[in-house]
Amino acid sequence: MTIEFHPITAILGAEVTGVDMATADSAMCDEVRKGWLEHKVLVLRDQHCGVEDHIAFGRRFGELEVHPFATGMEGHPEIVAIHSGLKYDYAASAWHSDVTWREAPSMGSILRGVIIPPAGGDTCFADAAAAYDRLSPEWKERVDGLTATHDFINVFGGRLSDEEKAEKRRQYPIAHHPVIRTHPETGRRVIYTNRNFVTHVDGVSEEESREIIDHLERAIMDPSVQCRIRWEVGTVVMWDNRSTQHFATNDFFPLERRVERVTIVGDKPF
Ligand SMILES: [Fe+2]
């Protein structure tokens, strides 16, 4: 099979043909990795493989992470299942990249559609490097050297007792990351704040911090740097968590939706 990348926009995302996750060898995975760096979000259709194949494919790209707050699948702690439809409230409906409160947030995730509603449940992605490029020179200058504080507590604290909170805090101390990080492989500059996990921009007033976070979020929210993925059962989406943000649409209640993901360990942002 020949692998082909069909760009979704000239900026972000590609539909990939010619890859079967279950049988892909390392030469093919090298091709996938190159395309992944370039397009940041890859969509593989009709991947009717099982949990084991999903995990094995993920391991081709690095060591897999176990999420400290989401419960893994029984026997497969590397798999996080996101199963929803029973409630209207949907946690991933805010622009974010994953686990930025970790000292070394994940490099990327590979998400597989298992139960897909007949309508709704798309995932939106934004190119955080293109969003940075489009900032004015004044704004680039203003945010280039700043760092921000990232904390898991707002999103995950509610489900923990005080004791558990203290224990998790010991394991995951508050992290400080550059507001604009540099992608370790492509060298591109990337907006790296998000409303879920960033509590404030370091060393500036509360008001200025709010202004900066709002401005950078608006840059991410520009539809011109985004793509939107419609799911089918067997669709697999892989995103570079270092250079993109995502948003899960909250528009399928009361329909059921289940996606399963593996996540690849990343490095400390600089
Ligand atoms: Fe997420």
Image (cartoon, grey):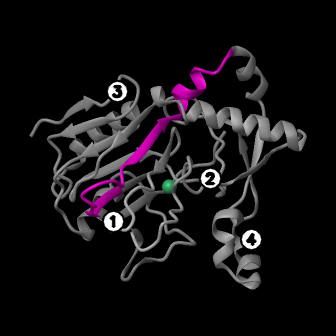
User: Which of the two discs, 3 and 2, sits closer to the camera?
Assistant: 3
Residue pointed to by mark 1: 257
Instruction: Check disc 3: other Cα within 10 Å, few if <14, some if 14-19, many if 20+.
Output: few
| In this rendering, position of residue 134 left or right of residue 256 | right
User: Which of the two discs, 2 and 1, sits closer to the camera?
Assistant: 1
Residue pointed to by mark 3: 9
Q: Amino acid at mark 3?
A: Thr
Q: Position of residue 253 (x, y in %)?
A: 39, 64
Mark earlier in primary sequence (2, 1): 2
Instruction: Check disc 2: other Cα within 10 Å, few if <14, some if 14-19, many if 20+.
Output: many
**Where 215 sits versus 76, above or below?**
above
Residue pointed to by mark 2: 100
Mark earlier in primary sequence (4, 3): 3
Q: Are marks 4 and 2 in contact (CB under 8 Å)?
A: no
Residue pointed to by mark 4: 169
**Where 151 sits versus 146, above or below?**
below
Q: Amino acid at mark 2?
A: Thr
Instruction: Check disc 1: other Cα within 10 Å, few if <14, some if 14-19, many if 20+.
Output: many
Q: Amino acid at mark 1?
A: Arg
Q: Are marks 1 and 3 in contact (CB under 8 Å)?
A: no
